[in-house]
Image (cartoon, helix red, strand yellow):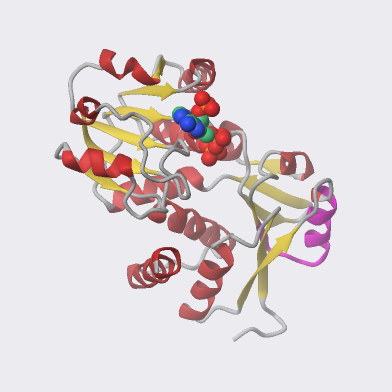
Amino acid sequence: MITGHAMVCGVIGNPVGHSLSPLMHNFYGQALGLDYLYVPCHVENGRVEEAVEGAFALGFTGLNVTVPYKQQVMSCLADLDDSAKSIGAVNTLIRRGDGYVGYNTDADGLGRALKEHGMEIAGRRCILLGAGGAAKAAAYLLMREGAESVAVLNRSLEKAEMLAREMNEKAGRPLMRALPLDGWRQLEGDSYLAIQTTSVGMQPNAGRAVIEDRRFYEKISQAADAVYAPATTRFMEYVEAAGGEAINGLDMLIYQGIAALELWNPQVKVPWVVVAHVRQMLEERLHG
Ligand code: ATR
């Protein structure tokens, strides 16, 4: 039940109509019996600073931030957590006395999804496909969790080089190396953990993988695709056809939301049965 004491959070973006966060968060509120409301807030371009100030004045405990404000919002905040600084984007704001602190829960979301499926990072040789915003969160996670090495493969080699340079500086060791998409031929051995963060394979352009050569997939034993629609991407099909395991991006989406909820409500832990219900609800919504 929502009372006059309800904790209020929301998501700012433009557009926000497609966001699955209101569905997920209000579901948690009901399932866990919290006095908690989560609202979608469409913010016009150029008004993000006003929106953040307004939310603070209205007493919002926290906000999620989506496209196109994940970087712009950084200049409106009292402080930034290491996750947001390292990833260079904010997706979660948490209220404190003098303003909001910016976090990024995308890395935690991916980390929890991998763990849930028994996909270890520590000491592992990894492949990161893509060098955009989602890749940065994945790169930060792989560094933080002690990957042995990371090959960053991207269409634009320059962007991969920039990402590798930044993360190597943070890691203080030559953890990542940048390669063009066909650079996979230079990778030694097999049993790699691969994280697919490009938009190739996403609805409505499903049916393609960023690397089509099937020999590439023989190098991969476990993989996560950040794409969640379609439920099984071409990338996942290729990994599985070569004998590997693959998960889609739905659990990453779910766990980045849970990480935000737990930052706003430190006493709340979402039990697995509630996670299973949310997954089912989202699957029905996305795939019918
Ligand atoms: P996000 O924030 O979701 O990561 P992004 O920052 O726009 O989105 O990054 C998109 C990623 O998908 C990039 O790695 C991009 O490659 P480039 O850096 O070369 O642009 C990759 N990508 C998008 N379309 C692609 C395509 N048709 N072939 C290969 N890579 C593609």
Which residue: 44% across, 58% down? Answer: 254
Q: Is residue 44 left or right of residue 19?
A: right
**Is residue 133 something that shows in the picture?**
no
Total numbered badges shown on the rendered structure: 0
* Whole-percent x, y for residue 167 in the image: 49, 23
* Whole-percent x, y for residue 100 in the image: 72, 51
Image quarter (top left, top right, bottom left or bottom right) of the C terminus = bottom left
In the rendered view, tell whether residue 181 sits above or below residue 275: above
Q: Is residue 272 left or right of residue 100?
A: left
- 93 or 208: nearer the viewer: 208
Q: Is residue 227 left or right of residue 61?
A: left
In the rendered view, tell whether residue 223 sits above or below residue 275: above
Q: Which residue in the rendered view is the most extreme toward the left?
A: 243
* Whole-percent x, y for residue 230 in the image: 38, 53
**Is residue 250 something that shows in the picture?**
yes
The main secondary structure of the magenta stretch is helix
In magenta segment, residue 54: yes
Which residue: 63% across, 50% down? Answer: 66
Image quarter (top left, top right, bottom left or bottom right) of the N terminus = bottom right
Which residue: 45% across, 68% down? Answer: 285
Magenta span: 49-63
Q: Quadrant of residue 197?
A: top left
In the rendered view, tell whether residue 116 sits above or below residue 190: below
Q: Is residue 172 left or right of residue 17?
A: left
- 131 or 49: nearer the viewer: 131
* Whole-percent x, y for residue 79 in the image: 70, 42
In magenta segment, residue 145: no
Which residue: 31% across, 51% down? Answer: 232
